[in-house]
Image (spheres, coloured by chain):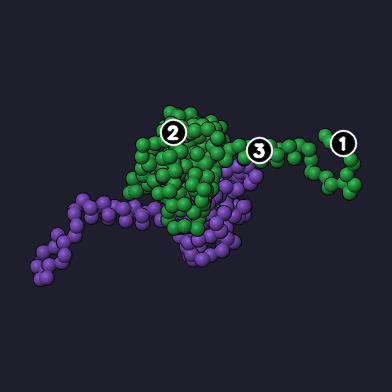
Chain colours: A green, B purple
Amino acid sequence: MRVLGVDPGLTRCGVGVVEGVAGRPLTMVGVGVVRTPADADLGHRLVAVEQGIERWLDEHRPERVAVERVFSQHNVRTVMGTAQASAVAILCASRRGIPVALHTPSEVKAAVTGSGRADKAQVGAMVTRLLRLAAPPKPADAADALALAICHIWRAPAQNRLQQAVADHASRGPRRPPAPHPSKGRTA
Amino acid sequence: MRVLGVDPGLTRCGVGVVEGVAGRPLTMVGVGVVRTPADADLGHRLVAVEQGIERWLDEHRPERVAVERVFSQHNVRTVMGTAQASAVAILCASRRGIPVALHTPSEVKAAVTGSGRADKAQVGAMVTRLLRLAAPPKPADAADALALAICHIWRAPAQNRLQQAVADHASRGPRRPPAPHPSKGRTA
């Protein structure tokens, strides 16, 4: 599975492509940052983010896109830009029919470091180790994008099993309550 | 001047086109709502908003787009969807080179009712009167989109004068401090 991770932002939008399956060593395919000038108007910045994401999709043809889920409890100005950049990334992928998954920052940290409260340095160190890189990717947004992709690859089997269970349940109809006296001697 | 007003939202994105100039009666060209299903995933919803906005731009060819400026002090879930829908609207206009202006809800209310704290009914009533409609546009998002367009047309002359003053000032260089003893008998 090839996944593009996107750490959304207007000033720096981290992008990283990772290939692999859960339980096997992963490979970094590419990493970088889409930047837009802080003094440009919002419209031009969103167009620049769109062009940047489109280039990464064209070049690396990911099968999945993993985007950081944005919360609004943080800084007001920053979070709006982050939400808007994430909308552009999600739009670009969805237009091409590429499935998009959202992961919270703590899910990503927990996936790569074992702790949902790990700091940036710890995430960078684990991304470097897991992808067997010579040095942590800079800036932190680039490392975070790779961590998102890794998180998605590792969580995907569990998510697929969950979706399958939901689909099976839906196709069978609601589960009946257990019989008061289960019949013995027969299994399905 | 023909302006498309956009009251951004994922469930209901209000759109309204108004034509006119400040100081003259205004004309409604079109009004409607772009809707996306609440149970669809975010990517599909953003693609649907994009398609809807593109149809309005294609059909009405506005010279300006006015979008409500989103703040994050409101409900967390709602505001993220609003920010993301607004990003798509701004992106669609900017990709075509159409200038986009953002107006706050209180600027819009003050423009059409005289009070920045007017309620929805008051805004609806004034939009109906100003555009000489038979009844207030429904839902409120549609009326708000028209109010945004009206606000933009009325504020544009002031904004243009301001931008011109800034540009003039920049081309003349910084203003010198006043002379301690102004010379008499000469004016520029």
Q: Secondary structure beneath disc 1? A: loop
Disc 2 marks a residue whose amino acid type is Met
Residue B11 in view (yes/no): yes
Residue A26: image location, x then y, percent = 48, 33
- Residue bearing mark 1: A186
Q: Chain of mark 2?
A: A
Residue A166: image quadrant is top right
Nearer to us in this view, A71 or A147:
A147
Asked whether the residues under marks 3 and 2 belong to the same chain, the reply is: yes
Q: Earlier in the sequence, mark 2 or mark 1?
A: 2
Query: Image check: A72 left or right of B161?
Result: right
Nearer to us in this view, B116 or A87:
A87
Asked whether the residues under marks 3 and 1 belong to the same chain, the reply is: yes
Query: At 33% across and 49% down in the image, what residue appears?
Result: A39
Asked whether the residues under marks 2 and 1 belong to the same chain, the reply is: yes
Which residue is outermost to the bottom? B181
Residue A182: image location, x then y, percent = 88, 44
Query: At 75% across and 40% down in the image, what residue appears?
Result: A169
Q: Secondary structure beneath disc 2? A: strand
Q: Secondary structure beneath disc 3? A: helix
Q: Quadrant of the C terminus of chain B?
A: bottom left
- Residue bearing mark 3: A161
- Residue bearing mark 2: A28
Q: Residues within 10 Å of mark 2 (few under 14, many from 20)?
A: many
Residue A172: image location, x then y, percent = 78, 38
Closer to the eye: label 2 or 1 = 1
Mark-to-mark CA distance, 3 and 2: 26 Å
